[in-house]
Amino acid sequence: MLKVSSVTRIFGQKAAVDNVSFEIDRAAFVGVIGRSGAGKSTLLRMMNRLTDASSGEISFEGRNVLTLQGAAKRAWQGQCAMIFQQFNLVPRMDVASNVLHGLLNQRSTFATMFNLWSDADITRAMQILDRLGIAEQAPKRAEALSGGQQQRVAIARALMQDPKVILADEPIASLDPMNAQVVMDALRRIHEEDGRMVIANLHTLDTARRYCDRVIGMRDGRVVFDGTPDQLTTGVARDIYGADASFNESATSTAITGPRDAAYADAMLA
Ligand SMILES: Nc1ncnc2c1ncn2[C@@H]1O[C@H](COP(=O)(O)OP(=O)(O)OP(=O)(O)O)[C@@H](O)[C@H]1O
Ligand SMILES: [Mg+2]
């Protein structure tokens, strides 16, 4: 489905992403981990064409998306919705309109300017909000919501595009553990129920282990690990994060607890 081939992005003298290759052959839930500056955001932004690659190819369903221009590029951006750490909502606009703005790629500027949404669009936006458990927030200004609610609005806006891929750049980094769990649960459920591919940059190991089918570890722009959560042992994590023997897992923890964590703790102790 998605094939990243020898992708490099150079900023000045430095390769932020350095000859990265991997393939995702089904609509998996993939986590990308690594310390600050490892190149996680740059990688995601190249997929979505927010940042240009210096070299290499990223193909989706057999087509190189890095060379798309104009309408074809916008269509691809519609197919791979992006979610950000800071939600990127319009703070003073109501929640429903924020969600409807997910249709921006598909609509004329005129219709958007005057908020000329069809009844069908509005119904769909409300259904998506309902699915995320925040339908009653629809008339409120986005800025009046909690962080966890705002991130769910951002997910709703992404779903409005009906994307094949959801790219999430540190979606829970600004949230407390409880809201982090609500948001990750929502992403996981959307992935499972709709069969959408999710690629999420995550800054904590336990989140990656708990929610992902596959984890890609980056260090200094390169992929240094690519495997299942089971293979992501403390030793491997230490290598990804470039830490020494004093590496402490709790430093990369959001303290989300749950059955998978318990099973994992057992496995680590065994
Ligand atoms: N627009 C830019 N101009 C110059 N350098 C950049 C730019 N964007 C990223 N970089 C550099 O590229 C490297 C990778 O950055 P990137 O933001 O992709 O890392 P990251 O893994 O997402 O880090 P974090 O966990 O802090 O978000 C860093 O050294 C960063 O300083
Ligand atoms: Mg980043």
Image (cartoon, rainbow, N blue to C red):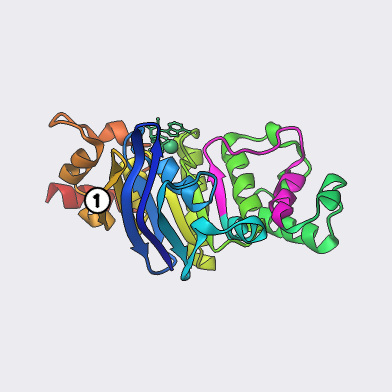
Q: With 145 as the anchor, is 164 left or right in this view?
A: left
Q: What residue sits 59% from the left and 55% below the top?
A: 77
Q: Residue furthest top?
A: 246
For badge 1, the amino acid type reads Phe
| Image location of residue 246, percent across then percent down | 15, 28
In the depicted structure, whether residue 169 falls above or below residue 132: above
Q: Is residue 211 visible?
A: no
On screen, residue 87 above or below 124: above
Residue closer to the observer: 170 or 151: 170
Q: Is residue 105 left or right of residue 231?
A: right
Left or right: where 114 falls relative to 76: right
Q: Which of the 4 image quarters holds residue 147?
A: top right
Q: Is residue 5 visible?
A: yes
Q: What number of labels is visible?
A: 1
Q: Quadrant of ligand 1?
A: top left
Q: Nearer the viewer, residue 111 or 69?
A: 69
Write down the quadrant of residue 127 in the picture. bottom right
Please say whether residue 104 is one of the residues in the magenta stretch.
yes
x, y percent for residue 65? 51, 60
Give the image location of residue 215, x and y in percent: 32, 53
Q: Which residue is mark 1?
A: 225
Residue at image position (62%, 46%) is 154
User: Does the magenta-highlighted stretch encompass residue 35?
Assistant: no
Q: Which residues are magenta?
A: 81-105
Camera-nearest residue between 56 and 193: 56
- Residue at left 50%, top 33%? 174
Q: Position of residue 153 (x, y in %)?
A: 64, 46
Query: In terms of secondary structure, where does tag 1 sit?
Result: strand
Q: Residue at x 33, y 36 (%)?
A: 253
Eyeballing the image, is 73 above or below 257? below
